Image: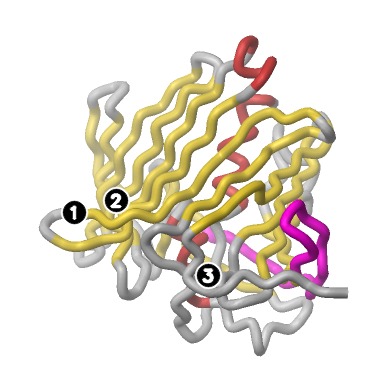
Amino acid sequence: MTKKITPILFMLLSFSLWAQEHRAFDTGEWFKFRIHYGMFTASYATLEVKDDILNNMPVHHVVGIGKSSGLLNIFFKVEDYYETYIDKAIVKPYRFVRKINEGGHTKDIVVDFNHQNNTALVFDKKRDTKKSYPTVANFQDMVSSFYYLRNSIDIDNLKAGEEHVINMFFDNENYPFKLKFLGREVIKTKMGKIACLKFRPYVQADRVFKEEESMTVWISDDDNRMPVKIKADILVGSIQADLDAFKGLKHPFKVVID
């Protein structure tokens, strides 16, 4: 299950709510996460927002990188790159990149989205093939979903038990991704105590996850809506991702003072 560590992190960050738009992030934002089984650090992952130009249009270029560390890097090397190019105004994806090497298992895929024609052109570089697939309305890719959430969530009107669904395109498929708001919680981190919004993404139980409700995500209950903690129960135990460092936040960072 080790090769699932970094992809699970980026998957967990991929969900959304429908609400009034909010500017929660900007160019220069950077997060670092420590991914671990108990005390054992398995890998680190980063997410960074950059400025870029795609097809003569200014975009936010988000780069996610996950790499194994320590003993894991010796016995099972993981090096994953996830990227999305998103519209700066309304956070919709124009291009998605997935380049991974997990213990020798590799993928190298670039997906270009055409929102006018509702299509996704999938370029599998490893097999040197291109194929077009239909997309559904108001979709996000796996990484852009996280940033869409942060600009869309209406934290003032959330109610425990609410469920929301986002359309997501990943690899070559469309599927609905459901999210449930569990409530508010203050959690301890290396940066101090942080007030958080607690969510449960629903996933299909399979060979990796124990059951449909096996994941929990904590997002800061402030204007940044940054990821603070992610926990997932899998068939071989429990995996956790904790925010380890950050910089370039658009809004002031707040801690809870006792």
Residue type, mark 1 in image: Leu
Give the number of the mark in front: 2 or 3: 3
The disc label shown at residue 95, or none: 2
Residue type, mark 3 in image: Arg
**Which residue was labeled with disc 1?**
54
Magenta span: chief secondary structure: strand
Q: Residue at x 61, y 17 (%)?
A: 73
Classify the position of the N terminus by image quarter: top right
Cα distance in 3D space between marks 1 and 2: 9 Å
The part of the image, by quadrant, that contains residue 58 is bottom left
Asked which secondary structure carries label 2, the reply is strand
Classify the position of the C terminus by image quarter: bottom right
Q: Is residue 212 visible?
A: no
* 145 within the magenta span: no
Please provide the residue range marked out in magenta: 176-194
Is residue 65 placed above or below 180 in the rendered structure? above
Instruction: Indicate left or right for 103 with 48 as reference.
Output: right
Front-lying residue, 228 or 89: 228
